[in-house]
Image (cartoon, coloured by chain):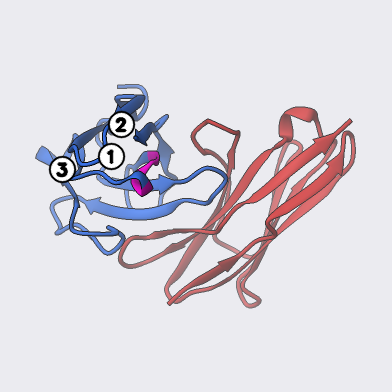
Chain colours: A red, B blue
Amino acid sequence: GQNIDQPTEMTATEGAIVQINCTYQTSGFNGLFWYQQHAGEAPTFLSYNVLDGLEEKGRFSSFLSRSKGYSYLLLKELQMKDSASYLCAVVRNYGQNFVFGPGTRLSVLP
Amino acid sequence: GAGVSQSPSNKVTEKGKDVELRCDPISGHTALYWYRQSLGQGLEFLIYFQGNSAPDKSGLPSDRFSAERTGGSVSTLTIQRTQQEDSAVYLCASSFMPNEKLFFGSGTQLSVL
């Protein structure tokens, strides 16, 4: 089976840095995606990690440790528009490949 | 098309009626997923199509739910004898190949009165 955990809610201040963690247990691991979903909208792609280490893309970075079953999404210089849900998704090499975590609702306060 | 297209964007129906939700994936995408999302909740997997393989129906919540994908392109999700608990946003997503990033449609908001 598989299990993906994320904190349910987080709050941070505009301009700050926030780290959203994702832990997973799965067989056939083949990568991990992060998606952003604003209220009432569809999820949009943020990042993809398949090897260990940090992937940086502007204000957003994503880290993966396959041996620990752990990933995080790091958001720097937070802006009000970053208030959204952040979904961690593990990709497996069999079956219905994408397994989404419950999502973390981030609120950015002024 | 340029993106994943879903129709209708909103559907209000009476309890007991059947509904059909449509998804037009990005042209050439072989993988297609249906998810359900209740207000403030995560994505609930429903069904997965990959190429010409038999679909993975393991997420369908009851036999009132069914889906098909014709010609490896357009997919239709059908809910028979709708119940109030079926009210949710139904999201469709596609990818070029398995394991590649998913592109989501804007969803269909289903309200069962």
Whether residue A53 can be seen here: no
Tell me the CA gap for discs 2 and 3: 13 Å
Q: Residue at x 68, y 56 (%)?
A: A8
Q: Is residue B43 above or below residue B112?
A: below
* Residue at which label 3 appears: B69
Q: In this orientation, which residue lies closer to the viewer: A79 or A65? A: A79
Left or right: B2, with B15 as reference point: right
Residue A43, image x, y percentages = 51, 38
Q: Which residues are magenta?
A: B85-90
Are the residues flagged by discs 2 and 1 from a single subunit? yes
Q: Chain of mark 2?
A: B
Label 1: which secondary element: loop
Residue B46, image x, y percentages = 32, 54
Q: In this orientation, which residue lies closer to the viewer: B94 or A10? A: A10
Q: Residue at x 34, y 35 (%)?
A: B113
Q: Quadrant of the N terminus of chain A?
A: bottom left
Contact? badges 2 and 1 (CB < 8 Å): yes
Q: In this orientation, which residue lies closer to the viewer: B57 or A94? A: B57
Q: Is residue B52 above or below residue B5?
A: below
Contact? badges 1 and 3 (CB < 8 Å): no
Look at discs 2 and 3 and give the one toward the viewer.
Answer: 3
- Which is more N-terminal, label 3 or label 1? 1
Q: Quadrant of the C terminus of chain A?
A: top right
* Residue at which label 1 appears: B29
* Residue at which label 2 appears: B26
Q: Residue at x 37, y 55 (%)?
A: B45
